[in-house]
Structures are given as C-alpha cells and as structure tokens.
Image (spheres, grey):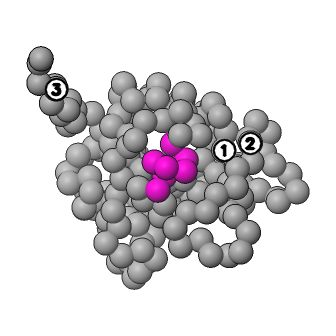
Amino acid sequence: MKPPKPPKPLDRSKPLLLIDVDGPLNPYGARPERRPAGYTTHRMRPTGFTDGRPLRVWLHPGHGAELLALADRYELVWATTWKDEANDWIGPRLGLPRLPYVDWPVMHGRAPRGTFWKTQYVLEYAAGRAFAWIDDDITDLDREYVDQRHPHAALLMRIDERIGLLREDFDALARWAA
C-alpha cells in the first residue's frame, strides 16, 4: 500500500485573488424587494449572526465557475469577515473548493490614514506578492496606501454592493493577471 501523496504546495508564482463575500458575491445593498437577476436567495446562520431570523444572502450560481476559471491565473483566497466560514456557507453553494482565508487579527478596528480596516492586513497577508483584491469598501485612500507600501503589482477593485460582480469584472481580473 502506497503512502498518501503530500498536499500540492501553493503556487507562489501566481498572484493572490483576495475575495470579499458581502458586496462582490452577495450584493447585499440591492433593494430587498428586488433580488438581482440571476441570483438565488439563501438563508444562513454564520457564527456571530444573532439577529433572530437567518441572514439573507444572494449568490449567483455562475460566480463559482468564473472564480474557478481564474484559478489558473490566481491563488484564490477569502478576504471576508466570514473568514473560514466562507468555506462552509458560501463556497459549497458556488461549487468552490475550500480556500485559504485571511484571518483578520482585528475586525472593524482602527486603520491608518483613513483607509479601510482590512487594507493593512491585506498587505500583511500578501507579504510582498502581487495581488488583486475585490471588495465593496475600497477607496482611493486604500489604493494610495497600497501603492506606497507594496513592492509588487496590486489591483484593488471596488465592487458596487448593490450589483455584485459583473462579467466585465471577471474579464478585467483575467486581463490583469495575464
């Protein structure tokens, strides 16, 4: 009997694709009475959600295949407050495998120079690697902060939380990594 093969090491030559859930994948900002076209409604109870009824999450079933298509060019990573729970609640509904995740040391805390609280930790996680980051809270201050402190290429894409990821967003991510 052969011993099991060791896990495949991460391909450090690929840039990271840091994926936020709420906004890019779950357009939570859309009007509650109008689910965005192509999205399905899911009810979830992630840890810490204690608001009585389950959380409504809208997901587009095609986004999983779109992200998997980018996995040839990127190392996919959750960069969401869902942290590892994105692997339990979001990934399976989109057909994604378990992904690594940014384990935020502090969530919703203070951030340098008016940046989004995640930005400083995204740079720590990237550890000098090229990365693309999709999130609904990215601003010009975050882009400036990353430009000044990150030695490699970085693409920060602000996604409208009322709309979510669009075809042109996936195309832009593919072009940037090419």
**Residue shown at 41% from the left, 55% from the top:** 84
Residue 121 in sight: yes
Q: Judge the density around disc 3: few (<14), some (14-19), many (≥20) Cα neighbours within 10 Å.
A: few
Q: Amino acid at mark 3?
A: Pro
In what element is the residue under mark 1?
strand
Left or right, 128 with respect to 131, comes to: left
In the displayed structure, 70 sits above or below 35; it is above
Residue at which label 3 appears: 4
Find numbered disc 2 in the image and state the secondary structure of the residue it sits on.
strand
Q: Residue shown at 74%/48% (left/top)?
A: 41
Q: Amino acid at mark 1?
A: Leu
Task: Return the residue at label 1.
Answer: 59
* Residue drawn at point x = 55 percent, y = 50 percent: 89
The x, y position of residue 35, in whole percent, is: 81, 49
The residues bearing labels 3 and 1 have C-alpha atoms spaced at a distance of 36 Å
**What range of the chain is rendered magenta?**
85-91
**Which mark identifies residue 40?**
2
Q: Main secondary structure of the magenta part?
A: helix
Residue at 45% over, 70% down? 116
The residue tagged with tag 3: helix, strand or loop?
loop
Q: Mark 1 and mark 2 in contact (Cβ < 8 Å)?
A: yes
Q: Toward which corner of the image does residue 76 lie, by quadrant?
A: top left
The crowd level at tag 1 (other Cα within 10 Å; few <14, some 14-19, many 20+) is many
The tag earlier along the polypeptide, 3 or 2, is 3
